[in-house]
Image: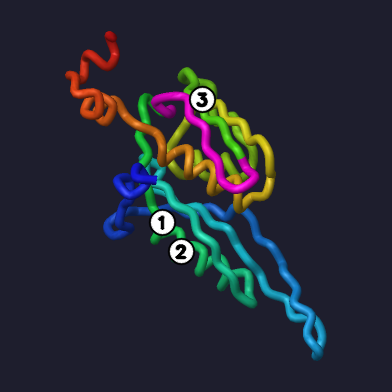
Amino acid sequence: MAAQTINRVKSADIELKDRLVSVNRVTKVTKGGRTFSFSAIVVVGDENGIVGHGLGKAKEVTEAIAKGIDDAKKNLIRVPILHGTVPHFQKGKYSGARVLLRPASEGTGVIAGGAMRAVLESAGIHNILAKSQGSSNPHNVVKATIDALSQMRDAVQVAKQRGVELDKVFNG
């Protein structure tokens, strides 16, 4: 969890694009009948290494999406991207959802399912092999993908942690 606090980003001065992952209609049965409301999962990112997710709930779909976007802007993280892909293999987990992220060579594209694809494309990753295991619930898959991305480390962080020079990370 310590890695997440280091990677946090403020939403000011960043041009963010939003993607709607899913909209869910929920019903509450009251004595006066059924009351419908909507929950929307939204992913925002600048397609250059910054991504966040949010959940909005409201009586109207557009209101729920707007609330989701506002929530997503509060949960932004920075993701290290190396040549359009992730720097290393990484697993992520949230509740029942487990995801695997594997770097891919140039021209592979984003090989990922629905909710994962939205997160990875919003982060600006163009080549990746990703697999969603366990739960297919979009809420949990998005959070598991964000968890995996927040654990990613770039070469500078690895060199600092090991106490060696940057070129030693690649050669040794």
Is 76 a magenta residue? no
Q: Residue at x 82, y 85 (%)?
A: 33
Q: CA distance from mark 3 to mark 1?
A: 24 Å
Instruction: Check disc 2 and report the residue beneath it.
Output: 71
Q: Residue at x 29, y 14 (%)?
A: 170
Task: Tell me which corner region of the image, top left, top right, bottom left or bottom right, holds residue 27.
Answer: bottom right
Q: Is residue 6 above or below residue 84?
A: below
Q: Amino acid at mark 3?
A: Arg
Q: Residue at x 21, y 28 (%)?
A: 160
- Please tell me whether mark 1 sits on a helix, a strand or a loop: loop
Is 92 a magenta residue? yes
Q: Is residue 32 above or below residue 111?
A: below
In terms of sequence position, does the residue under pointer 3 or pointer 2 come before the other?
Answer: 2
Is 24 in front, or is 4?
4
Quarter of the image where the C terminus is located:
top left
Instruction: Check disc 3 and report the residue beneath it.
Output: 102
- Please tell me whether mark 3 sits on a helix, a strand or a loop: strand
Image position of 139 (left or right of 51): right
Is 54 in front, or is 150?
150
Instruction: Check disc 1 and report the residue beneath it.
Output: 75
Q: Are marks 2 and 1 in contact (CB under 8 Å)?
A: yes
Q: Is residue 157 above or below residue 138?
A: above
Crowding around mark 2 (Cα neighbors within 10 Å: few <14, some 14 to 19, many 20+) is many
What's the magenta region? 85-97
Q: Position of residue 81 (x, y in %)?
A: 37, 32
Q: Is residue 3 above or below residue 107?
A: below
Q: Amino acid at mark 2?
A: Asp
Is 6 in front, or is 48?
6
Crowding around mark 1 (Cα neighbors within 10 Å: few <14, some 14 to 19, many 20+) is some
* Residue located farthest toward the top when viewing the structure as drawn: 171
